[in-house]
Amino acid sequence: MLCFFQAQGMAFQASSLLILLLSAIAISDAGSIGINYGRVANDLPSPDKVVELLKSQGLNKVKLYDTDATVLTALANSGINVVVALPNELLASAAADQSFADNWVQSNISKFYPATNIEAIAVGNEVFVDPKNTTNYLVLAMKNVHASLVKFNLDSHIKITSPIALTALQNSYPSSAGSFKPDLVEPVIKPMLDFFKQTGSYLMVNAYPFFAYTANSDKISLDYALFKETSGVVDSGNGLKYYSLFEAQIDAVFAAMSALKYDDVKIVVTETGWPSIGDENEIGASEANAASYNGNLVRRVLSGNGTPLRPQDPLNVYLFALFNENQKSGPTSERNYGLFYPNQQKVYDIPLTQEELKGGQSTPVNRNSSQVPVSGEVSKTSVGQTWCVANGNAGEKKLQAALNYACGEGGADCTPIQPGATCYNPNTLVAHASYAFNSYYQKKTRKTGTCEFGGAAYVVSQLPRYGNCEFPTGY
């Protein structure tokens, strides 16, 4: 957009005023909320139960990372719109061989459609950062898969697109200066956007304000990153004011497309989220912040407004993710983006539908009446700190066995929960187990896997409190 205004000379001021006016008065149709259903885990419920969960939460849009037959069969006749994916490792084959694309569409798409309402195929995922260097295959693979859809008379029902990460941008601040990396523009960005225009498709964008905040917490306001009330940030290029980092990021992509004269291509945000737990250096990762970000994002999307740069385009967003996925690699945050635990309990309460917007604020969940209570807001002084507490739903037998191990062979400091000691009261199994589990967890320097106890414990990011009992944060 900045390049466009520079080319227009004196039209800059008038156009800026027009955009400001539009952003003030234009109201788009309400956007939509979907969710990513990743399965990099060994403890998730069956696909049939997942479909029941989606329906119970009013979620009618789901994005997958493959075309698993069991999942697609479970989604049949559910009323849920589905985005499927052709993984990066198949891009080269799909690009090189039309018959491969035909066979893939026949086996993975036409076999399930229309009983399973597949509305789009994500060809690859964040291909530009794929270490296997699959970028050169992307556009041709998309064209071949689209040709296959035409062959099976599915092209008018199913869109072809591909998610990009914000790392595809050379510049993203201010938003009006958004631009794509020069080495991507001619080889892939322009051909891809041309393909979207020709087929009536859209660009998928994965946007994570969390990454920007945790890397620049000394410069970016946490409230700005969490959609909370702020005085706003004015874009020095076009004068638009932003009240959330998310909208600024999305408009940077719009500006980058506008600079290449692709103003008419739409965007769908196919991943965004905030982790409920992170490593000590992952500033801002907490249950409270995750609840604020995702809850406020849903309110923002369902309010009916677009972004400052595209006020009349509804925001369509897929939250990341449905479940915590325990087999994902990388930092702790990677395994803790879920709105739900594998047992289908909520990690925190947020609204997901228009009806739920009438409810209260988004908050962490008290999982049962005997759970260790937590109090106080998460501040920067507690960011990155985590504790281990007992799972009251694990059952007395499992909790007692885990408590015996922690205080015995595990080497936890259980002196404070002995009769007459500072943490003896309340004298309950859950309270005592929570203290012992946390002692073990802290002594093991909060390493991954040290707060499990066979499902009898889980990690929290707010300091547990039992009367005057203080839970240790390290030894």
Image (cartoon, helix red, strand yellow):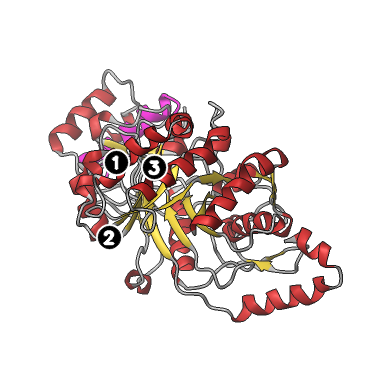
Taking the image as shown, residue 347 lies to the left or right of residue 237, namely left
The image quarter containing residue 87 is top left
Name the residue type under label 1: Gln
> Which of the two discs, 2 and 3, sits closer to the camera?
3
Residue extending furthest toward the top: 409
Residue at 50% in and 35% down: 279
**In the foreground, 448 or 94:** 94
Residue extending furthest toward the bottom: 25
- Label 1: few (<14), some or many (≥20) within 10 Å? some
Secondary structure at numbered mark 3: strand
Q: Mark 3 sits on what residue? A: 85
Q: Earlier in the sequence, mark 3 or mark 1?
A: 3
Taking the image as shown, residue 139 lies to the left or right of residue 436, namely right
Residue 57 marker: 2
Name the residue type under label 2: Gln
Task: Give yes or no for contact between labels 2 and 3 (Cβ–Cβ under 8 Å).
Answer: no
Q: Earlier in the sequence, mark 2 or mark 3?
A: 2
